[in-house]
Image (cartoon, helix red, strand yellow):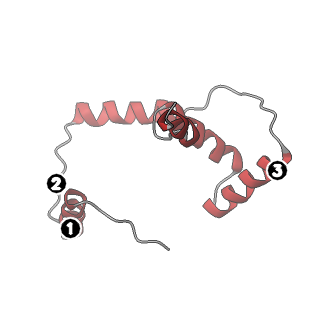
Amino acid sequence: MTKTRLDPEEQELLEAYESGGFESDLNADRRESLARAAEETFKKDKRIHVRISSRDLEALQRRALEEGLPYQSLVSSVLHKFVSGGLKDISALKSAQRPR
């Protein structure tokens, strides 16, 4: 298992939490707002059908097995991260950096 590297602020938060000194400053309205946003994020109310190569499907299934989740959940997570800006298309970034 790899150890996650924390920046100084994250390390300070972790130490405060582990020592029992961490206190949340969320008020009830903000907590409710965040709960609603999380609920909407994980609500799966639409279905799509996608054709992919069997090689890619097998790779997805292997990766999902390594992560311990169903492959459909992995695909959904990857798509969500991409559309929300959490994943970047490395090949597009590389081609944009090439001199013309």
Between 28 and 40, the one nearer to me in the picture? 40
Q: Please name which of the two marks, 1 or 3, marks the residue nearer to the observer.
A: 3
Q: Secondary structure at mark 1?
A: helix
Q: Separation of disc 1 and disc 3 at Cα?
A: 44 Å
The residue identified by callout 3 is 55
Indicate the amino acid at tag 1. Glu
Q: Secondary structure at mark 2?
A: loop
Above or below, 68 against 34 in this view is below
The residue identified by callout 2 is 23
Q: Secondary structure at mark 3?
A: helix
The reply to whether dot 2 and dot 1 touch (C-beta < 8 Å) is: no
Q: Quadrant of residue 19?
A: bottom left
Q: Residue furthest right?
A: 54
Residue drawn at 77 percent across, 31 percent down: 50
Residue drawn at 66 percent across, 25 percent down: 46
Label 2 or label 1, whichever comes before in sequence order: 1
Q: Residues within 10 Å of mark 1 (few under 14, many from 20)?
A: few
Q: Separation of disc 3 and disc 2 at Cα?
A: 48 Å
Indicate the amino acid at tag 3. Arg
